[in-house]
């Protein structure tokens, strides 16, 4: 295997440091040691604030309304799906300080330089456009309900605020999430206590076949949707930052916020006035006194901004990680602006039927991230003794290949969807014949991808991945 010199590693140009009101230069390059700063504790609010929004509440809501689960069945599905996604979030976050690059650059280890276009490209579209549109619609509808301004104007205001935070970059994102944290936690805690005391955990239910497994897939998809961003928000930390603290605060931020609000969503759905309302946001906030309803709607707007600042930022980072040369120093910011423009039109088109395809979207997230995680963790285990300096150099070697990654992921995604997908847009071979199987796509995708990836390397007799 040929290696590169330190001069071949793409280093982010410009100076940024700890400046907050400044456009972060560069894109997906290595962060110089002189620019490293931050502490693990900040990851707690960075991963708590973005989940303090109605999109999180709605994940628990669909378990009751769409799948007919009981409150406690939904709660169990929430804990299982979110728990797994939170653990992987913590583990992936620890690589940021070690390599000093975003998650989708670290992904090149398991996929090779150009093979990594598969997961990085998917994440750029899903994060920069898909999630961006979902949360923009949620925030716009909440602002509309709060102010009664036209929906399109509300959407423009929400997107403008989101883009402002994302365009400036890493430091402002961390600061915004920090100051949004106490506001969101206080408001959503009050709303949560009110909802849980009003809910009917023992309400009569009629679970559809396979509904429990589908809800697990949805909750897993929501939590794990943050995984491809994990190291984006730790790559500025110093290399000696505590891995335990990083994993703990990252995972805990996702776990506590998602479990709380998804459980609240399940409790709200046990109320007839909420479950029967065509607008779930209005139905939920309608059970509160007016002052609490207004505060909750405001929190939903702020939470949407907190979530989409991360989505548009990491979507742009993933795009620059595709390997295409963009000469502009502000290339990440320019790409973020482009995604924001596209996301506006996607969100605009979805204002009329918000929420109807949300469950499908969450399942699709789990379909591709599950196999991607399988490659990431298999590679992590197989190369656990690899010299970090060698791995760091390979990340920027355009001749570095590891075709086991993209092949295993592509087969794992395709085969698992064909066999096990169970949603309104497509039903796989197995659920078509027996609906009790629910949706086992992401679980099957992980297993299939793992078997192919490990077998590939076993046949190759564990030769180190080579740079041609």
Image: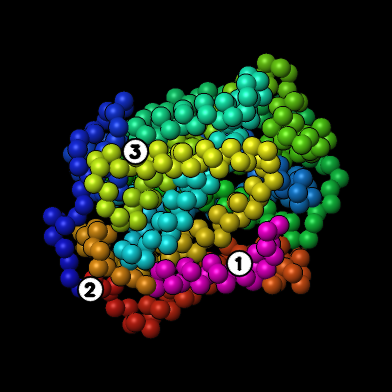
How far is the residue under mark 1 from the one under mark 2?
A: 34 Å
Residue 243, magenta (yes or no)? no
The reply to whether discs 3 and 2 touch (Cβ–Cβ < 8 Å) is: no
Q: Secondary structure at mark 2?
A: loop
Answer yes or no: is residue 104 visible.
yes
Could you tell me which quadrant the N terminus lies in? bottom left
* Mark identifier at residue 417: 1
Answer yes or no: is residue 43 visible.
no
Q: Residue at x 73, y 34 (%)?
A: 279
* Mark identifier at residue 134: none
Q: Which residues are magenta?
A: 404-428
Residue 38 placement, left or right of 131: left
The reply to whether discs 3 and 1 touch (Cβ–Cβ < 8 Å) is: no
Between residues 56 and 97, which one lies in front from this camera angle?
56
Q: Disc 3 or 2, which lies upstream in sequence?
A: 3
Q: Please tell me how crowded label 2 is: few (under 14), some (14-19), or many (20+) other residues with Cα within 10 Å.
A: few
Taking 384 as reference, is 23 above or below it?
above
* Mark identifier at residue 468: 2
Residue 416, magenta (yes or no)? yes
């Amino acid at each position: 295997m040929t290696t590169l010199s330190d001069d071949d590693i793409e280093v982010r140009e410009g100076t940024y440091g700890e400046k907050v009101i400044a456009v972060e230069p560069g894109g997906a390059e290595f962060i110089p040691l002189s620019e490293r700063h931050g502490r693990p504790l900040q990851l707690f609010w960075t991963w708590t604030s973005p989940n303090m929004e109605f999109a999180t509440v709605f994940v628990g809501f669909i378990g009751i309304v769409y799948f007919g689960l009981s409150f406690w069945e939904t709660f169990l599905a929430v804990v299982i799906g979110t728990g797994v996604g939170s653990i992987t979030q913590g583990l992936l976050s620890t690589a940021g300080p070690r390599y000093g690059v975003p998650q989708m650059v670290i992904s090149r280890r398991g996929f090779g330089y150009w093979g990594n276009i598969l997961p990085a490209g998917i994440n750029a579209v899903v994060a920069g456009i898909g999630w961006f549109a979902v949360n923009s619609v949620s925030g716009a509808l909440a602002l509309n309900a709060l102010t009664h301004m036209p929906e399109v104007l509300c959407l423009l205001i929400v997107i403008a605020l989101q883009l402002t935070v994302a365009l400036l970059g890493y430091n402002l994102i961390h600061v915004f999430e920090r100051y949004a944290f106490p506001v969101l936690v206080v408001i959503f805690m009050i709303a949560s206590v009110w909802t849980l005391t009003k809910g009917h955990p023992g309400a009569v239910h009629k679970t559809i076949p396979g509904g429990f497994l589908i809800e697990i897939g949805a909750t897993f998809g929501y939590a794990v949707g943050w995984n491809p961003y994990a190291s984006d928000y730790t790559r500025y930390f110093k290399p000696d930052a505590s891995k335990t603290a990083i994993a703990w605060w990252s995972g805990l931020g996702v776990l506590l916020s998602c479990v709380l609000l998804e459980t609240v969503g399940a409790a709200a759905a046990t109320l007839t006035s909420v479950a029967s309302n065509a607008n779930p946001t209005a139905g939920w906030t309608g059970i509160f006194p007016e002052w609490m309803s207004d505060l909750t709607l405001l929190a939903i707007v702020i939470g949407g901004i907190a979530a989409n600042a991360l989505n548009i930022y990491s979507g742009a980072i993933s795009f620059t990680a595709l390997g295409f040369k963009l000469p502009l120093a502000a290339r990440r910011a320019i790409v973020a602006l482009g995604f924001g423009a596209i996301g506006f039109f996607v969100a605009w088109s979805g204002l009329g039927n918000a929420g109807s395809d949300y469950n499908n979207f969450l399942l699709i997230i789990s379909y591709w991230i599950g196999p991607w995680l399988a490659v990431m963790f298999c590679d992590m285990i197989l190369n656990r003794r690899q010299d970090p300096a060698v791995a760091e150099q390979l990340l920027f070697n355009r001749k570095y290949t590891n075709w086991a990654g993209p092949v295993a992921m592509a087969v794992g995604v395709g085969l698992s969807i064909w066999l096990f997908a169970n949603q309104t847009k497509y039903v796989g071979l197995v659920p078509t014949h027996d609906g009790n199987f629910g949706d086992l796509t992401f679980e099957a995708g992980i297993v299939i991808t793992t078997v192919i990836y490990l077998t590939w390397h076993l046949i190759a007799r564990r030769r180190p991945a080579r740079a041609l």
